[in-house]
Image (tube, grey):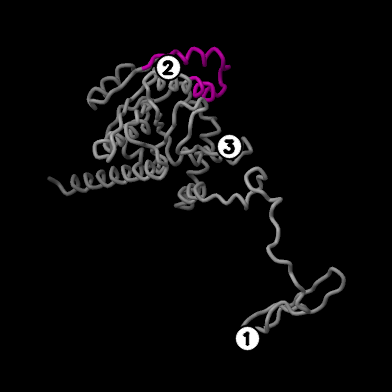
Amino acid sequence: MSHDFLSRSNTALRLEQRLQGAVGRALADFAMLQAHDRVMVCLSGGKDSHALLTLLLALQRRAPIPFRLIAVNLDQKQPGFPAHVLPQYLETLEVDYRIIEADTYAIVQEKIAPGKTTCSLCSRLRRGVLYRTAKALGANKIALGHHRDDMVETFFLNLFHGGRLKGMPPKLITDDGHHVVIRPLAYCRESDLSRYAQQKAFPIIPCDLCGSQDNLQRQAIKQWLQAEEKAHPGRMDNIFSGLQAVTPSHLADTALFDFAALHPTQRPEPEGDRLFDPAPDHAVALRLTHHSGRRIYFQKRS
């Protein structure tokens, strides 16, 4: 066995372990799973949803609590969609799965003018079908394949184009209150998922309905963030960390923080013309030198 082969095998193993660890932390940090959950894993055929299913299956085998996974693919009747690919692949995984057929493609083509962005309508239609499917399957959790980069991009999309500090949460409840949506890949980097997909040779099915539209706002945000990460490695990590360390009192949302209730805890008392105790000779201090009306002048002294 060659040294190169062993090196590649070790690299692949470390990557898989890193991704499994990231998924495990996300599941724990956001309490995504409880015992006896029925989790509908949405499988689009892209690299991220393939990785999601594979990582959840691996974690299921050693999880301390029992939960059920049901893989669901929505066949939107896009022209040329290879309907046989995913069923054949899922059979090899020996996972419970469903293929749901709904001609959302025809609806999008009818409603959206040529050249316009189709993603918004397409996602709403797809979401409605998936929520109904989850209800029919008795699934109380819906797992989506959005990763860390998706969440950062969504934050800036809402900020730049919607004027809102709003992101893509790792966990949320649906509007009807019937299901909890979870994003177990919240801590996973897209670059890691891309390498993982190559190593696993997932049967990738591209989205020809909207994936070929190069003028999407999300693509512009993605390219900008990629340039920032290249110029300043670690910037994406810092931005995502910022989404987890919010200080409401240092923003400007009066519904989020009660600015009107802010008052000093003590009433200041005048202390004469000196603001500071005499400083050591080697220190630099500020001294009040003159005051007239509301004007106060400062000068440095050493």
Label pair 2/1, CB-CB below 8 angstroms: no
Q: Mark 3 points at which residue?
A: 158
Q: Is residue 265 left or right of residue 192?
A: right
| Label 2 to label 1: alpha-carbon separation | 76 Å
Give the image location of residue 116, x and y in percent.
57, 22
**33 within the magenta span:** no
| Label 3 to label 2: alpha-carbon separation | 27 Å
From the viewer's perspective, is residue 138 above or below residue 255?
Answer: above
Quarter of the image that includes the C terminus: bottom right
Q: Name the residue under label 1.
A: 280
Comparing 72 with 37, the one in front is 37
Which residue is located at x 37 percent, y 33 percent?
A: 48
Query: For the residue marked with disc 3, what is the amino acid?
Result: Asn
Q: In this view, does 21 lie to the left or right of 231?
A: left
Q: Mark 2 points at which residue?
A: 76
Q: Which residue lies furthest to the left in this view?
A: 1
Give the image location of residue 103, x and y in percent.
44, 13
The tag earlier along the polypeptide, 3 or 2, is: 2
Badge 2 element: loop
Comparing 256 with 152, the one in front is 256
**106 within the magenta span:** yes
Comparing 167 with 220, the one in front is 167
Query: What is the span of residues highlighted in magenta in the rendered image?
Result: 100-125
